[in-house]
Image (spheres, helix red, strand yellow):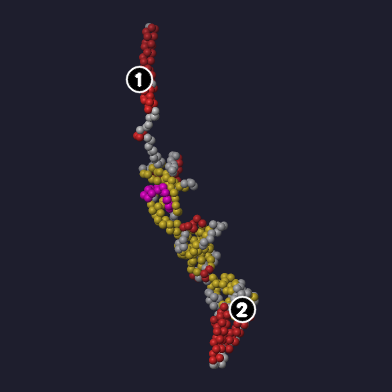
């Protein structure tokens, strides 16, 4: 019985060894090694190449063909897009407009500012306008000035008028013509001293010399500065009064350096003052000043607005909004752009829930839109809202825009 068991075990071992040989060892022999005939053929092939002395050249069909990498995309199913609030917008050409908001200050219109100076040496014996801020009409008396030179010129005018009334005849006619020329010269001197025509006629008609002559206002407006004092001595060229016509005033606003290139004379503006809630003044840029402030890096823009009733006072502050038309530009909503500081990325809708991150070059800023210079074309669609959530999903999945070459 024991012998029979031994024979059975030995038979099983033989069968197992035969199976292993047929499955593992035989396969290895057929794949990992070459037959003697193949090994003999290999040196013959190598020798044939060596006999020509040139290595084998690959055929044209075997050359490497560059394959363009497919643009990466992040998948966001439609139900998830609705959940996170993704909205899409078309890339298209739009009329862009930009609003520049700044602050300004009301100032006197320098074209309506008049200065009253003394044209002759003398003394102020009477002052009609004795405080700044008073409103004066054109031709209204401002001060009475005594001047020895004015008295001498009046005396000369009166004497020449009497001399011109000499005897008739040839000699008398010659004297009369000379007297008229001298009289006119005396009148011109009085006019140069700012003596009015009415005062000159009064002197000629009365034949009386006035001790003082009146300085009158050259324009209607407010006396914004007064240096004249009762009894003071004045010299030729000394300023006595500044008179400003405030029926129209200037608003001078600060414009930052980077905004200057967008502005031009004639751009419309809306001006508001906190002193008049709900009141808006419409104006246009009158002038852009040619200099820049080194401290604030701003230039000045000037506007003119009417001042009905004199409600607008110099040095009042105002808020200014300037509407700048940028023209028709290829643009996308500003919220569609993810700016990292070194580049700008948008997510282009490729359909079926896929969004492709794409780097773009941006231009001018409009009201809610950005100009696209490069990276997109008209007709494409981008993620306009919740773009940052799409970007977060792309970052989690490791999806990045292709590197620019």
SS assignment at label 2: strand
- The total number of labels drawn is 2
User: x%, y% of residue 263?
Assistant: 47, 59
Q: Nearer the viewer, residue 54 or 302?
A: 54
Is residue 288 shown above or below 392? below
Instruction: Name the residue tied to disc 1.
Output: 37
User: x%, y% of residue 203?
Assistant: 57, 85
User: x%, y% of residue 253?
Assistant: 51, 61
Q: What is the crowding at mark 1: few (fewer than 14 residues within 10 Å), some, or many (at least 20)?
A: few
Q: Nearer the viewer, residue 148 or 54?
A: 54
Q: Is 56 part of what is drawn in magenta?
A: no
User: x%, y% of residue 336?
Assistant: 43, 49
Secondary structure mostly seen in magenta is strand
Q: Residue at x 55, y 73 (%)?
A: 135
Nearer to us of marks 1 and 2 is 1
For the C terminus, give its image quadrant. Answer: top left
Is residue 394 shown above or below 325? above
For the N terminus, give its image quadrant. Answer: top left
Q: Residue at x 36, y 19 (%)?
A: 36
Q: Residue at x 45, y 43 (%)?
A: 392
SS assignment at label 1: helix
Q: Residue at x 46, y 61 (%)?
A: 264
Q: Which residues are magenta?
A: 369-384
Viewer can see residue 128: no
Q: What is the crowding at mark 2: few (fewer than 14 residues within 10 Å), some, or many (at least 20)?
A: many
Is residue 399 shown above or below 248? above
Figure quadrant of residue 28: top left
Q: Is 372 part of what is drawn in magenta?
A: yes
> What label sits on residue 372 in the rendered view?
none
Left or right: 228 as drawn, with respect to 320: right
Dot placed on the residue nearer the N-terminal end, 1 or 2:
1
> What label sits on residue 145 in the rendered view?
2
């Amino acid at each position: 019985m024991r012998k029979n068991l031994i024979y059975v075990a030995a038979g099983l071992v033989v069968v197992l060894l035969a199976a292993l040989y047929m499955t593992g060892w035989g396969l290895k022999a057929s794949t990992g090694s070459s037959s003697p005939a193949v090994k003999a053929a290999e040196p013959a092939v190598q020798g044939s190449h060596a006999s020509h002395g040139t290595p084998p050249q690959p055929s044209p069909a075997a050359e490497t063909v560059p394959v363009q990498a497919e643009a990466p995309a992040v998948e966001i199913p439609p139900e998830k897009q609705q959940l996170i609030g993704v909205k899409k917008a078309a890339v298209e050409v739009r009329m862009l407009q930009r609003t520049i908001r700044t602050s300004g200050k009301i100032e006197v219109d320098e074209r309506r500012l008049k200065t009253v100076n003394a044209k002759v040496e003398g003394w102020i014996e009477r002052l009609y306008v004795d405080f700044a801020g008073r409103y004066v009409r054109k031709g209204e008396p401002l001060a009475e000035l005594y001047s020895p030179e004015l008295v001498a010129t009046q005396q000369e005018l009166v004497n020449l008028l009497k001399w011109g009334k000499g005897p008739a005849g040839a000699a008398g006619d010659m004297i009369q013509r000379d007297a008229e020329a001298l009289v006119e010269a005396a009148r011109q001197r009085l006019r140069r001293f700012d003596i009015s025509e009415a005062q000159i006629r009064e002197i000629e008609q009365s034949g009386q010399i006035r001790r003082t002559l009146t300085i009158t206002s050259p324009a209607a407006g407010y006396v914004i500065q007064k240096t004249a004092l009762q009894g003071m001595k004045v010299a030729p060229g000394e300023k006595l009064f500044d008179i400003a016509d405030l029926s129209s005033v200037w608003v001078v606003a600060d414009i930052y350096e980077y905004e200057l290139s967008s502005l031009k004379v004639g751009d419309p503006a809306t001006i508001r003052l906190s002193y008049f809630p709900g009141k808006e003044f419409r104006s246009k840029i009158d002038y852009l000043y040619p200099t820049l402030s080194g401290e604030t890096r701003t230039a000045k823009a000037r506007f003119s607005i009417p001042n009905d009733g004199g409600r607008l006072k110099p040095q009042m502050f105002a808020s200014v909004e300037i509407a700048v038309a940028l023209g028709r530009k290829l643009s996308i909503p500003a919220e569609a752009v993810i700016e990292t500081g070194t580049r700008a990325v948008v997510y282009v809708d490729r359909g079926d829930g896929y969004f492709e991150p794409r780097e773009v070059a941006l231009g001018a800023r409009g009201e809610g839109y950005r100009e696209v210079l490069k990276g997109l074309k008209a007709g494409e669609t981008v993620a306009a809202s919740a773009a940052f959530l799409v970007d977060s999903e792309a970052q989690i999945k490791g999806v990045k825009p292709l590197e620019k070459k």
